Amino acid sequence: MKTTDVPQDDANMLQGKFKEPVYSLDADGNFTTVPSVGWNPKNEVMQEAWDNVNMKIERAKQDVVSGKVSPIAYYIEKNIMDVGLVASYMGIWKYRVKKHLKPKNFMKLSYGMLERYAKVFDITVEQLVNIEQ
């Protein structure tokens, strides 16, 4: 692709703040990089991926509200994490995080453990225990 042909299809996903380097050929036939705000096929795929992430977050929120899972499940989805990663940050075994995903076990957590979870998710304990805020 020639330097003049690098797509600049801004889908406003990055709000024009970031440009991705794209390899292209300059007028002399040498490879160079040209900043691009995106191109439609990639923008559509990225939008679909983020829609999927947002759908999972909303589903997790509804599961918390209905009492199926603890708020930890919501924040795992919201932060695009998994149980293993949370366990690693917490310094505990995965089975303990899985145990804490159950509402009855979550309600028994000490304030110190809640603080540790809140720190991992970069929120307050109040936000952790009450996702409606």
Image: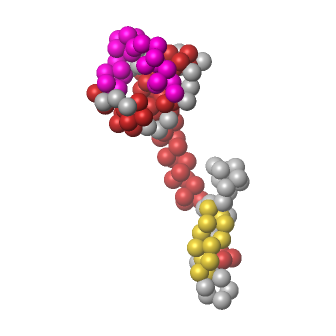
Which residue is drawn at the image coordinates 30% and 30% (left, top)? 93
- Residue at the bottom extreme, as displayed: 28
**Quarter holding residue 68:** top left
Q: Which residues are magenta?
A: 96-119
Residue 74 makes an appearance in the image: yes
User: Where 31 sits versus 124, above or below?
Assistant: below
Which residue is drawn at the image coordinates 62% and 73% (left, top)? 33
Q: Is-magenta flag for residue 16? A: no
Quadrant of the image containing the N terminus: bottom right
Judged left or right of residue 61, residue 106 is left
Residue 23, horizontal then vertical, whole percent? 58, 73
Q: Nearer the viewer, residue 88 or 7?
A: 88
Tell me how the rendering is colored.
secondary structure
Q: Nearer the viewer, residue 101 or 16?
A: 101
**Quarter holding residue 16:** bottom right
User: Where 18 sits versus 79, above or below?
Assistant: below
Q: Nearer the viewer, residue 112 or 22?
A: 112
Judged left or right of residue 17, residue 103 is left
Which residue is drawn at the image coordinates 56% and 16% (left, top)? 126
User: Where 50 sits versus 83, above or below?
Assistant: below
- Residue at the left extreme, as displayed: 95
Residue 44, horizontal then vertical, whole percent? 55, 53
